[in-house]
Image: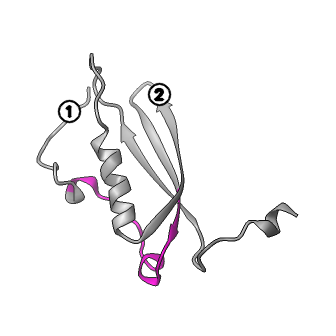
Amino acid sequence: MFLSAFKFKSKFSPRTFTYFIPSPPKRKTGYQEKEFDELIAYLTKNGFEILDIKTQSSTNNESSGMWVISLIRPKNKEANDTELIFDYESYSATSELEIEYD
């Protein structure tokens, strides 16, 4: 049976972590999504293993952006007991940079 062959390396159960990143203004060249990169650094520095990442674009009349949906697994008891609340402005080294979205 397929499920019996799939065993986790850790005793800690995987869980999802979702985060919404608003679309930046239109640009003529590519750019690095620093908020996404800092989100991944935050998760790995806080004792989580990233098992899978998916993104889903979201557009409506008022806003657009992307949902980052991650399947993560705690690597230790401290991470397992942590409630993940990612406040980008307080975590980011670039939080003094203000970006306005129209």
Determine the residue positioned at 70% across, 70% down: 7
The residue type indicated by label 1 comes to Glu
Tell whether position 75 is magenta.
yes
Determine the residue positioned at 48% across, 77% down: 80
Helix, strand, or loop for circle 2? Answer: loop
* Residue 14 percent coordinates (x, y): 58, 67
- Farthest residue toward the top? 28
Cβ–Cβ below 8 Å for labels 1 and 2?
Answer: no
Q: Which residue, given by chain and number where applicable, does mark 2 sit on? A: 60
Q: Residue 91 has which mark?
A: none
Q: Quadrant of the C terminus?
A: top left
Q: Is residue 85 visible?
A: no
79 horizontally vs 35: left or right? right
Sequence-wise, which precedes: disc 1 or disc 2? Answer: 2
- Farthest residue toward the bottom? 77
Instruction: State the colouring used for the structure image.
Output: one colour
| Magenta-highlighted residues | 71-89
Q: Quadrant of the N terminus?
A: bottom right
Is 67 situated above or below 80?
A: above
Total number of numbered labels? 2
67 horizontally vs 39: left or right? right
Q: Residues within 10 Å of mark 2 (few under 14, many from 20)?
A: few
Q: Which residue, given by chain and number where applicable, does mark 1 sit on? A: 100
Helix, strand, or loop for circle 1? Answer: loop
Tell whether position 9 is magenta.
no
Determine the residue positioned at 21% across, 59% down: 90
48 horizontally vs 71: left or right? left
